[in-house]
Structure formats: structure tokens, C-alpha cells
Image (cartoon, helix red, strand yellow):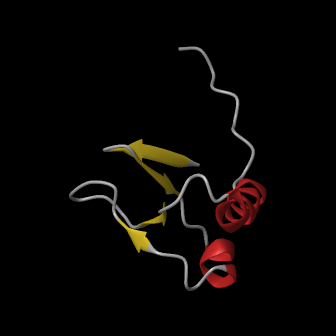
């Protein structure tokens, strides 16, 4: 759903969230990575909490891994 890299929070971009949050800042968390949404002010929950909820709703349920 997200990653923290160099003390910065990045949230996965889904097709649904890309359309719903077109102006939210984006950048890759590290060289060679895909772009993620960048949460610039983690204390401003009003700005990023709707994004987190929308991302959570857009992602599929994790599958159960079979033992080898």
C-alpha cells in the first residue's frame, strides 16, 4: 500500500486513485521505482487520509500463500 523511504511516506498509485487525486504530488521513492503519491505533510491528515482510504479500497485482498 505504501513505503517509507528516506523519512518520506509514499502511497501506491492505483488507477482509481490516479483519477481521483490528479493533483496529488508524485515521485518514485528510489531510483528505478514506479511513481508513488508523496505525502509531503504527514501531520496534515485531512489532505492525505482520503487518499489512504481510497488506496486501501482499490487494492485487492491479499491471497493466501500455499506452503511449498
Residue at the image position 53 percent from the left and 49 percent from the top: 2
Expressed as whole percent of the image width and height from the top left, the position of residue 52 reads 68, 57
Observer-nearest of 32 and 6: 6
Observer-nearest of 56 and 38: 38
Classify residue 42 as left or right of residue 54: left
Expressed as whole percent of the image width and height from the top left, the position of residue 37 reads 50, 66
Residue at the image position 53 percent from the left and 14 percent from the top: 68
Classify residue 36 as left or right of residue 61: left
Residue at the image position 26 percent from the left and 54 percent from the top: 30
Observer-nearest of 20 and 65: 20
Task: Say above or below: 27 vs 18.
Answer: above
Classify residue 31 as left or right of residue 59: left
Task: Say above or below: 27 vs 22.
Answer: above
Expressed as whole percent of the image width and height from the top left, the position of residue 16 reads 69, 75
* Residue 54, quarter of picture: bottom right
Residue at the image position 37 percent from the left and 43 percent from the top: 7
Amino acid at each position: 500500500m505504501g513505503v517509507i523511504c528516506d523519512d518520506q511516506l509514499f502511497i501506491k498509485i492505483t488507477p482509481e486513485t490516479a483519477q481521483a487525486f490528479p493533483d496529488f504530488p508524485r515521485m518514485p521513492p528510489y531510483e528505478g521505482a514506479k511513481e508513488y503519491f508523496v505525502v509531503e505533510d504527514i501531520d496534515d491528515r485531512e489532505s492525505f487520509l482520503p487518499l489512504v482510504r481510497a488506496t486501501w479500497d482499490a487494492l485487492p485482498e491479499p491471497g493466501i500463500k500455499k506452503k511449498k
